[in-house]
Amino acid sequence: MTALADRDWRLIRDAPRDGATQMAIEEIAAKTALEDDLRTVRVYSWEPSTLSLGYRQDSATVDWDFCEREGIDVTRRQTGGGGIYHDRDADLSYTIVAPADEVPGNLMDCYELFCDPILEALDRMGVDAAFASTEQDAIYHPSCYLRDINPAHDIVAAGTDDRAKKISGNAQYRQRDVVIQHGSISYDTAPRAHVGVFDADVDESTFTDRVTSIRDEAGIDRDEAVDSVASALQDWCDADESTWRDGELEAARRLADRKFGTDAWVRDREVLEAGDN
């Protein structure tokens, strides 16, 4: 249990939502942390399937025709890094939201603190995982899972290969004096979609050579994996089981409509003012 457990935390086992709303709701949780002194940990999934672009990622790297044919939405994160394909089954996502003055100011120290429950969850599942001990060069830079593997925030599973495979990517940003960390944990690999969403000739085997999953490593079902992550997050900060307030969800929908779901944001990283759309 972290020293942060003496604060008020809530755990939300969230319903599947579209990508724009998933990104918007994190900013609403940040407002709640500041204004109501209530911090959030949550686990969630995506429906419909979504490609989340890194903050500075060029939208020209997206295969828009593939995404349209496959019914895959596209949004843009506030965090950097490469794009990640998310769906309801293969991807298992989480968020941690806390006031910035309560956590380490050093980015690497904050990653270590916030990834502790993720490593604990993987251990409970029987996955031999840790922060990457060595860097691996990028294979295809626009894809989060095929970028260079960074020991600071990339979690790998040792497995049986000479080179450890990535199982989780994690990223942070600070907004209004709040730290938001979110991450993607591979329950399954879904290589066709992971490479198909990009406008590049990347073979599926390139993805499976670099990436592994909970299912591959531990063979447990998805519900057990989700429960392991939720329980580890809850134990880490002694959170109370909770749900979103009606006002938070409505505010998230408005923000999704105004920002995270717009072409201006997704394609060009432009934010519309409240009255512009």
Image (cartoon, helix red, strand yellow):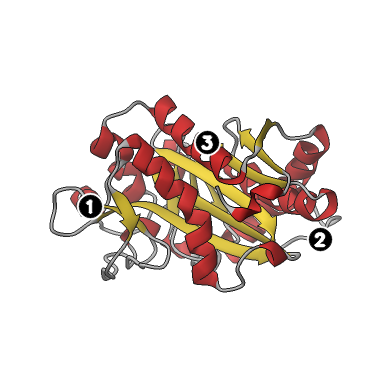
**Residue 127 or residue 5, whichever sits in front:** 5
Mark 2 is on which residue type? Glu
What secondary structure is found at the residue carrying circle 1? loop
Q: Which residue is mark 1?
A: 158
User: Residue 28: x percent and y percent?
Assistant: 74, 49
- At horizontal 62% and vertical 72% (from top left) the residue drawn is 105
Q: Nearer the viewer, mark 2 or mark 1?
A: 1
Compute the Cα span from label 2 to label 1: 47 Å
Image-based side of 198 in relation to 233, left or right = left
Q: Are marks 2 and 1 in contact (CB under 8 Å)?
A: no
The relative height of residue 153 versus residue 167 in the rendered view (above or below) is below
**Residue 167 or residue 20, whichever sits in front:** 167
Mark 3 is on which residue type? Ala
The relative height of residue 92 versus residue 60 in the rendered view (above or below) is above
Mark 1 is on which residue type? Ala
Compute the Cα span from label 2 to label 3: 35 Å
The relative height of residue 69 versus residue 208 in the rendered view (above or below) is above
- At horizontal 32% and vertical 38% (from top left) the residue drawn is 214
Q: Is residue 66 visible?
A: no
Work out whether mark 1 precedes mark 3 in sequence or the reverse, and give the earlier one. 1
Numbered label attached to residue 49:
none
Numbered label attached to residue 273:
2
- At horizontal 19% and vertical 48% (from top left) the residue drawn is 159
Work out whether mark 2 precedes mark 1 in sequence or the reverse, and give the earlier one. 1
User: Residue 12: x percent and y percent?
Assistant: 63, 35
Q: Which residue is mark 3?
A: 230
